[in-house]
Image (cartoon, rainbow, N blue to C red):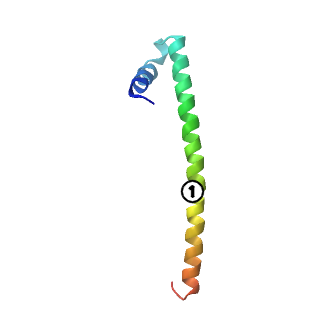
Amino acid sequence: MSTLKEERLKTIIVDYKNKSNGELKFALEELSSDFEETKGMLVKLTYHLDSVEKIYNDVLEEYKKRGNK
């Protein structure tokens, strides 16, 4: 999001009760977009974290099989 959009969104959020419907619609669209983008990143990070954990556990198991603790 550009700096101008961020600043506009901040001013709307601070005083949303006194903003026009157009401003509220802009805020809702930006917040919805940010929510979906963040949710997508969290899903990708979750898959990545699961993958890293599995690899770690596989390597640890092999390490222990070799007599290490």
Image coords of residue 62 (percent x, y): 58, 80
Height in image: 31 above or below 20?
A: below
Image coords of residue 36 (percent x, y): 59, 36
Q: Quadrant of the N terminus?
A: top left
Toward which corner of the image does residue 32 lie, by quadrant?
A: top right
Q: Residue at x 53, y 12 (%)?
A: 22
Height in image: 31 above or below 57?
A: above
Height in image: 40 above or below 8?
A: below
- In this rendering, would 27 be left or right of 7? right
Instruction: Say which amino acid is labelled 1.
Output: His
Mark 1: few, some, or many residues within 10 Å (few <14, many ≥20)? few
Please state which of residues 18 and 62 is positioned toward the viewer in this rendering. 62
Toward which corner of the image does residue 2 lie, by quadrant?
A: top left
Image coords of residue 29 (percent x, y): 56, 24
The residue positioned farthest toward the front in the image shown: 2
Regarding mark 1 in the picture, which secondary structure is present there? helix
Height in image: 40 above or below 47?
A: above
Q: Residue at x 45, y 19 (%)?
A: 12
Q: Which residue is mark 1?
A: 48
Image coords of residue 56 (percent x, y): 55, 70
Give the tally of numbered discs: 1
Q: Residue at x 55, y 87 (%)?
A: 66
Q: Residue at x 51, y 86 (%)?
A: 68
